[in-house]
Amino acid sequence: MSATVWGGLLGGLAGLGLLLVVTRVAVLRRPQLAVRVLPYVRDVPMRDQGPGLRPVSSPTSAAAGIFGPVLRSAADLVERMLGGSTSVRRRLERAGLDRTVQEFRIEQVVWGLVGFAAAAAISLVRALGGVGGVGSAVVFCVLGLAFGVFARDNRLGTQVKNRERQVLTEFPTIAELLALSVAAGESPVSALDRVVRRSHGALSEDLSRVLARVRTGEPVGVAFESLARSTGLPIVARFATGITVAMERGTPLADVLHAQAADVREAGRRLLIETAARKEIAMMAPVVFFVLPVTILFALCVKPVHEVYA
């Protein structure tokens, strides 16, 4: 294809995109029914954060608002091809993301489209330079689409690991605070409420959900058992199970919490020692590959001092 044809295609695509943007802006500028009616209904509370007036929080939600049906259909196709909705739902919970499986699939579609667009741009530049053919460009674009889809899934795994690392860092402090509150005479629910109100972090969010379940009438043991089932960290599962057993059998809860905090700190020390052992081998690489060759080079190339003065 000639450069004129490519230019016409690019101009048509740019015009179509501009038309879509203008059309969507015109729709967004139109005042909604809730905006026109609610100011005149004085006896009804203003629902500024309702679904109709909620601001767009991310580019993905904006794209879903504009191209909603197409993205949902593509997300359903990705779900049928990849499957594993139960695993995705569990990883979303472990990552602390307030998203459904379909919203995550839509994000995967958006990432895939970004990869497809990048691959298409590279293929276009190569075609204008006379390198590559149509078949290789199509294969490259498909690979870019697949790379974007799987990159979002890999990003979710990274988010899960980062949050679990944060939970492990916070756990000894949270456990000690709970133990001090219980030892001071507070009930487990009151101690949990005090710690949740005075701390911020990933583990505090999990405990706040447990506290919300307790306040809605769910037994404390059942709420902590749900935390043990949903978490992916064995230490947090043992923490929840230990609290449940201590409350059922009358075991001193403060001693249990102190022991678990000590176990987590000891596990952190062992992990630090293992990491240091691995880094020790990695630190030898600059010495072996840079310092030692330079030293040998100086020893071979520089003449001895007694030969210089001889």
Image (tube, rainbow, N blue to C red):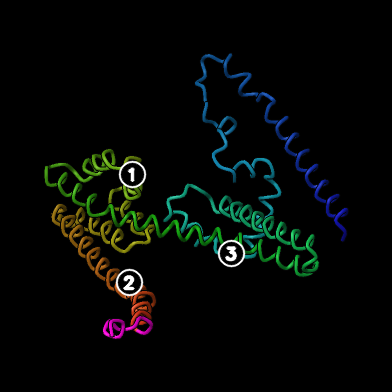
Give the numbered dot on residue 283. 2
Mark earlier in primary sequence (1, 2) = 1
Q: CB atoms at circles 2 and 3 under 8 Å apart?
A: no
Compute the Cα span from label 1 to label 3. Answer: 31 Å
| Residue nearest the observer in this picture, 210 or 20 | 20
Image side of residue 103 versus residue 274, left or right: right
Residue 92 position in % (x across, y down): 47, 55
| Residue nearest the observer in this picture, 165 or 178 | 165
Crowding at dot 3, Cα within 10 Å, few <14 / some 14-19 / many 20+, comes out as: few
Give the numbered dot on residue 208. 1
Name the image quarter holding residue 168.
Answer: bottom left
Question: Marks 1 and 2: which is nearer the front?
Answer: 2
Q: Residue drawn at (28%, 73%), measured in percent from left and top? A: 277
Compute the Cα span from label 2 to label 3. Answer: 42 Å
Q: Amino acid at mark 1?
A: Ser
Q: Is residue 204 above or below residue 145?
A: above
Q: Is residue 65 above or below residue 167?
A: above
Q: Which residues are magenta?
A: 300-310
| Residue 228 among magenta residues | no
| Residue nearest the observer in this picture, 254 or 286 | 286
Residue 232 position in % (x across, y down): 38, 61
Image side of residue 251 versus residue 151, left or right: left
Residue at mark 3: 83
Q: Secondary structure at mark 3?
A: loop
Question: Marks 2 and 3: which is nearer the front?
Answer: 2
Residue 237 position in % (x across, y down): 31, 60
Name the image quarter holding residue 265.
Answer: bottom left
Q: Residue drawn at (76%, 39%), measured in percent from left and top? A: 18
Q: How many marks?
A: 3
Q: Amino acid at mark 2?
A: Met
* Magenta part, dominant SS: helix
Q: Is residue 279 above or below residue 59?
A: below
